[in-house]
Image (cartoon, coloured by chain):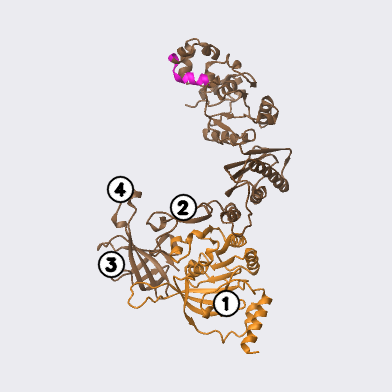
Amino acid sequence: MSRAARLKAVRASLAILEGSAGRPTLPFGDARVDDRLPGGGLPLGRWHEAAGEGMEIETAAAASAFVAALATPLADRGEVVWIMRRDDLYAPGLAGLGFPAERLIQVCVRDETAALAALEDALGAPGVVAAIGEAESPDLIAGRRLQLACERHGATGFLIHRRLFGGETRGRGSAAATRWRIASAPSEPAPGEPGLGAPRWRVSLERCQGGRPGDWIMEKSDGPLSLRVVAELGDRQLDAPQPWRRLAG
Amino acid sequence: MRRLAAVDAGAAALGLFTGQKATDALALAPELTLADADPEADARALRALADWCARFSPAVAMDPPDGLFLDITGVDHLWGGEAAMMDDFVGRLAKDGLPVRAAVAGSPGAAWALAHFGQGRIVASDAEPLWPLPVAALRLSPADATQIARLGLRSIGALAALPRDQLGRRFGPDVMRRLDQALGRGGEALAFRRPPNPWFARAAFAEPISVPEDLARACGDIVERLCARLEAEGRGARRFDLAFHRLDGAAEPLTVGLALPGRDPAAVTRLFLPLLERVDPGFGIDAVTLGAREVETRAPSQADLHAEQGGRESLAPLVDRLTNRLGETAVWRAEAFPSHAPERATRRRPALSPPTNTGWDVARPRPLRLFPRPEPVEVVALVPDDPPVLFRWRGTAHRVRRAEGPERLGEEWWRRPFDRADPQKARDYYQVEDEAGARFWLFRVGLYDAAAPPKWWLHGLFG
């Protein structure tokens, strides 16, 4: 048996052990990303974290744009619920990113606890295909509850880290399937074209159960996936040889 | 000059009367206790009393300053007849120390006359008991009443005996109307404090209850009873008002709303249960009422709620839970509103109402986060009409790498008096990208003016 075939067999048995075999995924359509994700795409029916840095912790604009882009293909199949503590999400802006704003139910809550409770409630409800919450990182128990809610109807959860009044976010271990760090990146319009190009983000996959982290520059595209990988940054393949340790974390 | 606004029974026995000068009254009865009149508190107390009366009838109208009308059509049998109902009513108020005069009659006018001028508690089935009453019992204006009295017509019977055409010609339409209302010949529209609601259920308890489990059971029972009626008639309601009536008369209603008309008792009870902890039972609760509002026709067969592709139906339980927990305004969908002012271009609609108008012009750049109030920024611009090269927002300087714009949005002059419209209020919006790639939506207010440098604001962030 060749090395590649053996690896494939081990991966398959791992997937069965983790219970992720046969789970639907949302591929990015680019091998540079999909190869690093378990099952060849963003696992659906799980929940994912996205965070920003600096001022973004307070405003969460880039992370929201990234999450909206991920949720856009899902919105064909059901409703999307967006739970926030500050009502500053602007639907025309979402529409400009290609997100079908008429499929979006917005919910404004008063505090952190209510945000997580509403997120859990929305994830477990029939007819909801994705729920997006803006909150700080939940602890392991709250994260596990989110996961159980996701499994009821296979909804996908997104948690955008946001602290309304700034400050450091607590980087806690959590039960999320993946954790992304999103920052804006300078756009590059085609030569000779005035103004701004398509928006770009520097996307880091910091943590991924059953996958490997990575760093990419992605750009908004008009295709069905609404994200296009422009470049891969660095190579973490060499410095992350022990995925099982990440699993335990 | 201070005058007496009201006297109680003891003071009346001493010969004091309403409208008397306070000094005269004190001369007659030096031990008199005076309290300042507070008409607003009186009105509040009357409103509270009207709410309390909802336990007798859902249709209660106020007759300020000191009267109440209860429409008891169709509810008196619950007390075993009109007389028994009135006895219960007067007895309960008397126990609270509230002197009350009450009468039951076929029309509001007759009941008013008998309650104000009749002797004792009267249940009138016809106009007979009205005849000996003075004409003032017809709720006439003082001028009309004195005019009629001057002509020697001292009782309603004497007035009603006159030929009708003479009556109208001599005293005017107002007297005719009041007479007809008292005799039940003319209609009278009462302004009910609550519109009479046919979707109403009530349960009274032999012993007052106060334990939370009992409240929950009472809630479940009464919801089931009303929902069974809704089911039988093929209706569903969007609002349910549950009120626990305490022994001391207070009844704070609890309201839950449904996004789609519903009548599933289990679902409605589930929405009420978290609210029950707000109920303060006081010394005990002796009655519970439930009213359904916004009742609509609803197809009798109900689709499976847990269908995967249920659409609106399947979302309703989630929307109901969130709305009742977080508030009516906390769950919505955004829809387009035809306005070019960015802060007015979206409007909230209920999450489950059918879409009316969606779609914004995606060709115009719009931010993902729009600040409720634009934030001031300090700007360095090379040319007044150009986008800035550097701006400072929240203490951080951002060097602009690329910019797009301007998009000029004028003031919506039709929203204010025409002469106050000001071309200086136009905003020029720029989408700028700083060196890190973050995108901002800046605008400059006003046209170029050499004397006053324009002000710049940050209105939103792109992702």
Q: Chain of mark 3?
A: B
Q: Which residue is mark 1?
A: A40
Query: Which chain does the numbered disc 2 sit on?
Result: B
**Chain A takes which shade in the image?**
orange
Q: Residues within 10 Å of mark 4 (few under 14, many from 20)?
A: few
Q: Mark 4 — residue?
A: B418
What is the chain letter for disc 1? A
Q: Which dot, 3 or 4, sits closer to the camera?
A: 4
Label 3 sits on residue: B384
Label 4 or label 1, whichever lies nearer to me, is 1
State which quadrant residue B236 falls in: top right
- Measured from the top left, where is residue B346 in percent x and y? 44, 56
User: CA–CA distance between discs 2 and 4?
Assistant: 31 Å
Q: CA distance from mark 2 to mark 3?
A: 42 Å
- Is B111 or B257 nearer to us in this picture? B257
Would residue B177 be found to the left or right of residue B433 on screen? right
Classify mark 1: helix, strand or loop.
Answer: helix
B435 or A123: nearer the eye?
A: A123
Q: Amino acid at mark 4?
A: Phe
Q: Colour of chain B?
A: brown
Examine the rendering and report whether any part of residue B291 can be seen.
yes
Looking at the rendering, the stretch of residues picked out in magenta corresponds to B169-180
Amino acid type, residue under disc 1 in the picture: Gly
> In 3D space, how far apart are the residues under numbered discs 4 and 1 (Cα atoms)?
62 Å
Q: Identify the residue shown where x is 60% and y is 46%.
A: B299
Looking at the rendered structure, whether the residues under marks 4 and 1 are on a common chain is answered as no
